[in-house]
Image (cartoon, rainbow, N blue to C red):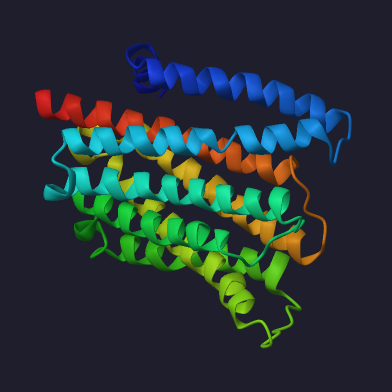
Amino acid sequence: MWKGFSETIQGSWIARFILSVFIVLSLWWVTIYWRDLTSGFENNAFTLIYPWISLIGGVVGLLISNKWGGLKSIIGRSLFVLSLGLLAQTFGQAAYAYYIYVLGIEVPYPSMGDVGYFGSVIFYLYGVLLLARVLRVNFSLRSLVGQAQAIIIPLILLGLSYILFLRGYEFDWSQPLKVFLDLGYPFGQAIYVSIATIAFLASRKALGGMMREPMSFLLVALIVQYFSDFIFLYEASNEQWYVGGVNDYMYFVSYCLMAIGLIQLGVTFKKIDES
């Protein structure tokens, strides 16, 4: 299961760098959490440092996409769009940092930063659709099992969002943008996680099973991203969110997984092309 990951780490210095940063920042964050710090220099420093992983992963993904023809091929386009999703997260992080540290707004939601955050939902959705085309998922969707998966998975995720966040939700139409984002984030992410899950199930047999491991990385990254946004919406609505908390660490994990997943996808496509 981890053979491809090991080969990616050994063969890519950028992947090794991301893994090293993940280990170091994770150990640092654990000390912040254990000391129950909710503000101060370390919380701020962690929050300003970890988004660089999304920038690095996005740029590397674009470079890998270019090697596969960029927008001219389905593979290149899928890598390109998924990389834009990471870069959109970078924009959202930078905008939120500006609101928090320059303008002094503790929880800038909704704001210009959500152009990036919600934009990543759209990019990830299109990206996994393209990967599904690469894996010929459209054929499996014709089966009863495929149709059931396409319906059940998003219903489970939307049901979870409703139970934990939207139950008792009060629609404040004086803030229509907030209402749109509160509903749009879980709905859009439920769709792309569902498509990614179906693509992952298809990858077990497609292309000799070589896509299974990189797809598992992308799927976990998207799921962590889903729960990261979900936790943010919940904490922001209940005035519990703070910089450098569990929510920020979840975003950090999702960025690392997505960055390594993109690198591993590039390595896997190269193997498939050479085989």
Q: Is residue 234 left or right of residue 182?
A: right
Identify the residue shown where x is 88% and y is 35%.
Answer: 36
Identify the residue shown where x is 18% and y is 43%.
Answer: 70
Q: Is residue 267 left or right of residue 67?
A: right
Observer-nearest of 216 and 96: 96
Image vertical order of residue 19 relative to residue 191, above or below: above
Image vertical order of residue 132 relative to residue 52, above or below: below
Q: Is residue 50 left or right of residue 102?
A: left
Rendering coords of residue 20 (x, y %) = 54, 17
Residue 43 can be seen, yes or no: yes
Q: Is residue 108 left or right of residue 229?
A: right
Image vertical order of residue 168 relative to residue 103, above or below: below
Rendering coords of residue 230 (x, y %) = 64, 58
Q: Quadrant of the C terminus?
A: top left
Rendering coords of residue 269 (x, y %) = 21, 32
Residue 210 can be seen, yes or no: no
Quadrant of the rendered image containing residue 273: top left
Identify the residue shown where x is 56% and y is 63%.
Answer: 112
Quadrant of the rendered image containing residue 250: top right
Observer-nearest of 148 and 274: 274
Quadrant of the rendered image containing residue 148: bottom left
